[in-house]
Structure formats: C-alpha cells, structure tokens
Amino acid sequence: MILAKILSSYTFRAALATVLGISIVVLIVMLAVYSLFSYNYFNAVHDGLSIELERFSEAYEQGGLPAANHFIDQRSQQFHVVQFAYVIADQDLEKISGSLKDWPEYREYGDGWLNFEMGILQDGSASREQDFVAVTQLMQDGNHLLVARSDVEVLAYVSFVTGILFRGFLVTVVLGAVAAFIVTWEFQRRLDNINRSIKTIMAGDLSARLKISQLPRDEGSELQQLAINLNVMLDRIQDLMDGVKQVSDNIAHDLRTPLTRLRNDLVSFQKDCSTNEFDRVETLIAEADDMLATFNALLRIARIELGETRTEKVSLALDKLIEDVAELYEPLALEKGIHLQLELCPIECVVDRNLLFQACANIVDNAIKYTPKDGHVQITLSQGDQYGFDHQLGEGGNQEASVTFSVIDSGCGIEQSNYKKVLRRFYREENSRSLQPGNGLGLSLVAAVAKLHDFQLIFRPNDPGLQVHLHMQG
C-alpha cells in the first residue's frame, strides 16, 4: 500500500525527474572528462613514442647497429609496464635487427604516425594479433628505424577509465533513485499522519487537530507550517459551526417558552370560543405543537451532540425494542396499505433505550411516510456482517459480533449525492417537500444518536426506495 502511494506520488516523480536531470549533467561531465583524458593520454603516448624514437636514433647514430642492439636490450630490461618494440631495416625495408620479426605493413594516419597489426607469440606457441602504433625515421645511411608500442596497454587503460566513469554514473543513478525513494517515503509517512487526522475531522470530529509533534521540529518546515495553518483554519471553522449551532439552539430555547404560553392560551380560548371558531383554533394549536416539536428536537439534538444529555445505557433486548417501534407504526402502515415485514434476530446490547427508540422510530416513520400506498417496508435486525459493512468501513473487528438494524422501503428514496446532506438540520430534498410535511430534523437526530452509540449510519439505494442501516461493529 505504502509502496503504491510512493510510486504514484508527485513527490517521487519530481524527485526522479531531479535525479534524471542530475544524472544527465553527470553524464555530460563524465563525457567531457573522458574526452579530455583521452586527448591528453593519446598525446602523451605519441610524445612518448617520439622521444623514444629520438633516443633510439641517437644511439644508432653514435654507435651503429651494436649500439642500437644494446639500446634495445637495455630498454627491454628497464620497462616492465610499457613495452616498446624496435626494428632496423635497410633501404628495401628488410629487417636488419630489432625485437619485431620483420618490418610491418602499416597504415599511415597523419603526421608520420603509423598503425599496424602483428601476431605476438603467447604461451610459447599460440599467436594473437595485436594493434601497434609506431613512428619511423630515415637515417643518413639509408636505413629505417621504427619504434612501436602495443595498443593493448593503451586500450586497457582507456577501458579501465571508461569503466570507472560508467560505474560512477550508474552509482549516481541508483543512489539518486534510492535517495528519492527514502525522501518520498519519509514525506509520505508524515503526509499520511496529516491525512489520517483530516479524515477523522471529515468524519465529524471537528475538535480533532493535526499533531505537530509528528512533523519535523524545525520551525521552518513546510509540513509544520501547513499543519499550523490547517489547525488555525479548523479552529475558525469550529467557532463558526459552534456559533451557528448556538444561535439555532438559543432561538429554540428562547422561543419555546412563549410558544408554550401561546399554545396554553389557545387551549384556554378554545374552551370559550364558538363552534365556528373551534376548528380554526384547533388548527392553530396543531401548528403551535409542530413548532414546539421542532424546537424540542433542535434542543435534543444539541444536547446529544454536546454530551449534555444524560444517557442511561443498559443491556436490553434489541429485538424487543424494534418490536415496540413496529407495533407503534403498524396502524399507520395498515392505513396506507403498506406491507410491514419484520425479521428480527434476538440480540442483547448495551444502549440508551429512550434515545435508540427515538432514532429507530424516526427511521421507520420516514420509511412509512415516503412509501406510497400498497408498498412494502422491511424491518430487520441481524447479527453478522451480512451487508459487507465491516469490509467497506475498513475496520478490523469481530464480524460475527456485528449488529445491523435495517429498514428497507419501496418509496421515493434519496439521491445518492444527498446522503450526507440529509443529515444536516432542516435539510429536505425538493421532491420530499411536496410529498409529506416535516422539519428536516428526524435524520439529524438519528445521526446524533448513532454517533453517541458509535453506530454507523449507512444509506444505500434500493431501486426503488431506500435502505437505511444502523450498523454496530463487533
């Protein structure tokens, strides 16, 4: 996983591009060094041959053939690394003396420089062709002098230098790629820490912050500065979100009392009003009840999210709780001709009964409310990961201990792009506004209760309809 991230990351590609650029520069430098070395080295070889020919000719001029032979013997004993070959030939280029077997057939390639091939005895019997570079000089007595040097040592030395340069280039590329991988791995590791914290925040925990201690300690670090700026931004977002929630909660709290007084006055007025005004006052009371229900739901959601609601979690039979919810809504389902199907597995769980009852009731209420006549609503309580939620959520847990409460209907459903939006306060889809009255707080309360119990609230399309799941991992 981490390897795939590194290989696909922009940082790694940028680092490789940098290594490639540096490698090209190193290659150009090495080629320049090689060219300069080769030029200087071959010049040195030519100069050495010219000096050697000059000394050889001086010995020949001063002492003739005996002196030349003595010079050859001395030089063969003196040189152990660089071996020169010598030939003295007459006017017809017939060998008179020297270390080569005869006067070679050469090729002239400029400025008196010669090149030829000649077989050299090896191991006393085998002969191998070798290249020689040579220079010649015509003496006053008409004889020819030739001094040659084998290319074997020259080419071996050039090959040695070329090998060093190539290995240096290869090491540069390999070490550069390894360094790029290590740097990217370290950067990716720190970036993963940031991403994990951001995912936690995206899941709804706005109080979470990026851990500066996991980043480089130097104050000038880009990652540290990024984390600081993100934390400051999150603080600002949380302040704004808390401000919006506080305003709505304050409005609900402040208006609930006068609305209650208004409702009570309407009830009192209804007792003394005429028959013609009775129905109108009753409608006003119903509207006041709806407004009070909305404000009460707002305050309840706020208390649950802030942890102010006193929760009394006890071990109870979830299947019995779901039966009570289904029994409560069965008359409404029968009135609309909706087939209500229950499949409940006996399960014990530690929950807050009142809050969970309200959450399950809201889900069932929405299903029946938005399912057309002669539709069907299926309510199930199952144990085990039958829907693949544990794998989908990427959590490691006991799949056999997973519990899922599901409500599956054949109603109008919810657009998949709005699955997160319907959890917001007062949000309602446009098509649902015309079908049923409501305040858009039912699923917000369900989400708050699910978070309090560490349940996962999951929506899935049913085609037609909607699947709503409250999933608790084992």
Image (tube, rainbow, N blue to C red):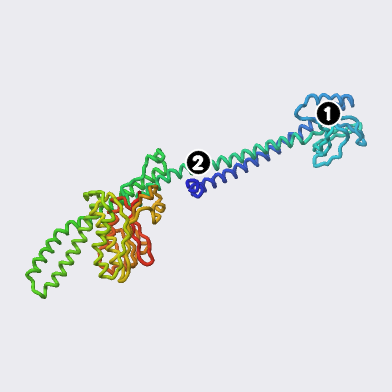
Comparing 113 with 142, the one in front is 113
Q: Position of residue 325 (x, y in %)?
A: 25, 60
Q: Position of residue 252 (x, y in %)?
A: 20, 58
In the displayed structure image, the side of residue 48 where residue 227 appears, left or right:
left
Query: Mark 2, residues whose alpha carbon is within 10 Å: few (<14), some, or many (≥20)?
Result: some
Examine the rendering and report whether any part of residue 441 can be seen: no
For image coordinates 36% across by 42% down, the residue present is 211
Residue position for label 2: 182
In the displayed structure image, the side of residue 136 where residue 291 appears, left or right:
left
Residue position for label 1: 56
Figure quadrant of residue 470: bottom left
Q: Position of residue 83 (x, y in %)?
A: 79, 30
Q: Which disc, if any, is residue 166?
A: none
For image coordinates 74% across by 37% down, the residue present is 155
Q: Position of residue 361 (x, y in %)?
A: 26, 60
Say what amino acid the circle numbered 2 marks.
Answer: Ile
Q: In front of the other: label 2 or label 1?
A: 2
Comparing 20 with 428, the one in front is 428
